[in-house]
Amino acid sequence: MKHTEETGTDGGEQLSDDQLFGQLAKADRVQLSRRERFGLLLDAYVLTPGRVAWSDWRTRIGILVISLFLLTGVAAKVSTSNWWFLEHVTIIESPATNQAPTNHQPFDGGFAAITEEGGWIDTTASFPWVEFNAPLGSTNYGEPIGRQLVHSTPDMVEMVIAGAVVSVGLAILIGITAGYKGGKVDSVLMSITDIMMTMPGIPLVIVIAAIYPPRQAWLVGVILAIDAWPGLARALRSQVLTLREESYVEASRTMGIPSTTILSRDITPQLMPYILINAAQAGRSVIFESVALYFLGVLPFTTANWGIMMDTAYSEGFALVNMANFYQIFWPMMAVVIVSFGLILFSQGMDRVFNPRIRARHSKKVGGGEDQEH
């Protein structure tokens, strides 16, 4: 089967290589103004990936969930900030004891409470005309669970980003370098990787946390990423061993292009779908492991975390014994599930963004057009 006769990955009409890249080559031959070149770059690197991503329902839901996660973190950060004019801005009040009746049930009063003063959603209030009074219930100390979830989000975001960046960054650096360089460099780097793979991850994290208790959220993410990178590094090395024999990589080497340029321009972009999927998996692992370790009391309660909420609900609210208080452990669990679901859908949808044929089909300036956007 010829290259141009392969089945399209999204089921649409297959384009020939000439259609895909002919206009790009033509654009390179003609003299473009600065504005036209800016338009091409904007379409190629921003608008087209955006159109491809938004055309997939998985990416749309993933982006919405991740955006909501980040916006919640921003709202909580703004509400507690003492910086300049933000000192007087409170979007969501910080949780404190006795802000609500103890063990207040979620959505108490049902929809009938909408017309009642002081209900879980009070539409009779003055500005801002709608007030929420512990809609998700409260703990046995009278702390609103919704406010606890919101004000735990900034530390969760910090932890997830730190863990994903460290685990994926180390895997890219070590895996791609080992696969491309080969020889002694490959042997040394893979020996280090294999040693790390043989170490039990969770027990190692527990020992490190016991010797040096992490007190910052980003440091917790870094520690949890220690055992997350070796598997991805091994997988990336295997991919690079194949890619480095491709004709376009061989041509770049023949032309004397530096290795760093070949790695960043020719090899790494081919691996981006796999890297992005694993970045989302790494973020999900950090959430799961941190919640589990905080719930078990292994990590110190120096940062806000949904695992601490679950531990408090279990040990002080007896949420698994007294089913009337089960909601106290249910809402943090739902937060973990929803964010993890969003990360998985986002990573799956990103696979289409880095497919060159789908991107060419959605491009309005190079190799595509309105009539080919299906």
Image (cartoon, rainbow, N blue to C red):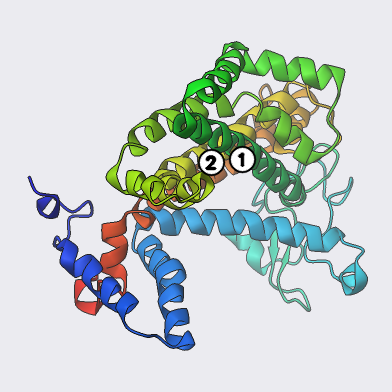
Q: Quadrant of residue 303?
A: top right
Instruction: Decide if residue 330 is in sight here.
Output: no
Q: Please state, as top left, top right, bottom left or bottom right, where the C terminus lies in the image.
A: bottom left
Please tell me which residue is depicted at 45% across the width and 30% down the height of the picture: 179
Position in image of residue 48 (x %, y %)? 38, 69
Quarter location, residue 370: bottom left
Q: Where is residue 224 in the image (x, y as percent from the top left)?
A: 68, 29
Q: What element carries label 1?
A: helix
Looking at numbered disc 2 in the image, what kind of residue is underneath it?
A: Ala
Disc on res. 231: none
In the picture of the structure, the residue carrying the numbered disc 2 is 279
In the depicted view, which residue is nearer to us: 63 or 318?
A: 63
Q: Is residue 51 left or right of residue 184?
A: left
Quadrant, the N terminus: top left
Q: Which amino acid does label 1 sit on?
A: Ala
Secondary element type, mark 2: helix
Q: Image quadrant of residue 97?
A: top right
Q: From the viewer's perspective, is 111 left or right of 52?
A: right
In three-dimensional space, the C-alpha distance between marks 1 and 2, rounded to whole angstroms, equals 6 Å
Give 57 or 5, whichever is nearer the viewer. Answer: 5
**Which residue corresponds to the image point at 61% horizontal and 61% vertical from the top-left?**
112
Residue 296 pos. (x, y %): 73, 21
The front one of 245 and 315 is 245
The answer to whether marks 1 and 2 mark residues whose Cβ atoms lie closer than 8 Å is yes
Query: Can you identify the residue that label 1 sits on?
Result: 164
Decide: few, some or many residues near mark 2? Use Cα within 10 Å; few <14, some 14-19, many ≥20.
Answer: many
Q: Which residue is drawn at 58% across and 41% down?
A: 334
343 to 287, vertically: above or below: below
Decide which of tag 1 and tag 2 comes sooner along the chain. Answer: 1
At 17% from the left and 60% from the top, the residue drawn is 12
Give whichever of 242, 158 is nearer the camera. 242
